[in-house]
Amino acid sequence: MMILSLSKDTVQVLKEQDVVFLKNRVKEVAVKIKMGLVNQTRLLTAASELVRNMMRYANGGVCQIEIVSSGRNNGVRLIFSDKGPGIPDIDAAMRDGFSTGKSLGLGLPGTKRLVNEFDIKSKVGEGTTVTIIKWANG
């Protein structure tokens, strides 16, 4: 399946106001591609979780917002990149109930369940990149 990028926008997230701006931009893009309300909510919930992680563990980073297309289906791809401490054990971090913070540990596995595609890459001491795609019809 080939995915084409139709538009690209990069948002720096370093402070609380940036989080609000990012969520508004993600919603605008989702509305633009006529994503339904349920899928918009899933996408925004996933984005909120990932941006919170980026703020909490890496003091911020950048998020690339893209409208992507595969065949007749349009979607939103979000790429969260930070220069934080990295995740030493991605497999553990992807298990329900795992948490290094004082949260419920629903973050990464919960986020994965909310989107159609989820990819995480991390190097200790270099940072983490999480890429998600939510299709408008899916």
Image (cartoon, grey):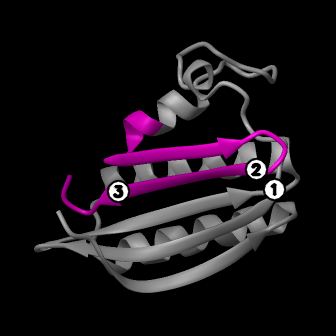
Position of 55 with respect to 20 (left or right) is right
Residue 79 drawn at (x, y percent): 55, 62
Give the camera-side residue of 128 and 100.
128
Q: Residue at x 49, y 68 (%)?
A: 27
The number of discs equals: 3
Q: Residue at x 21, y 69 (%)?
A: 2
Among numbered discs 3 and 1, the one appearing first in the sequence: 1
Spatial CA distance of label 3 from label 1 is 25 Å
Q: Confirm whether the magenta stretch covers residue 96.
A: no
> Is residue 83 placed above or below 108 in the rendered structure?
below
Q: Quadrant of the N terminus?
A: bottom left
- For label 2, the residue is 127
> Is residue 59 placed above or below 101 in the rendered structure?
below
> Is residue 113 placed above or below 16 in the rendered structure?
above
Residue 31 drawn at (x, y percent): 37, 74
Find numbered disc 2 in the image and state the secondary structure of the residue it sits on.
strand
Quadrant of the rendered image containing residue 90: top right
Among numbered discs 3 and 2, the one appearing first in the sequence: 2
Q: Which residues are magenta?
A: 112-138
Amino acid type at mark 1: Lys
Q: Residue at x 66, y 43 (%)?
A: 122
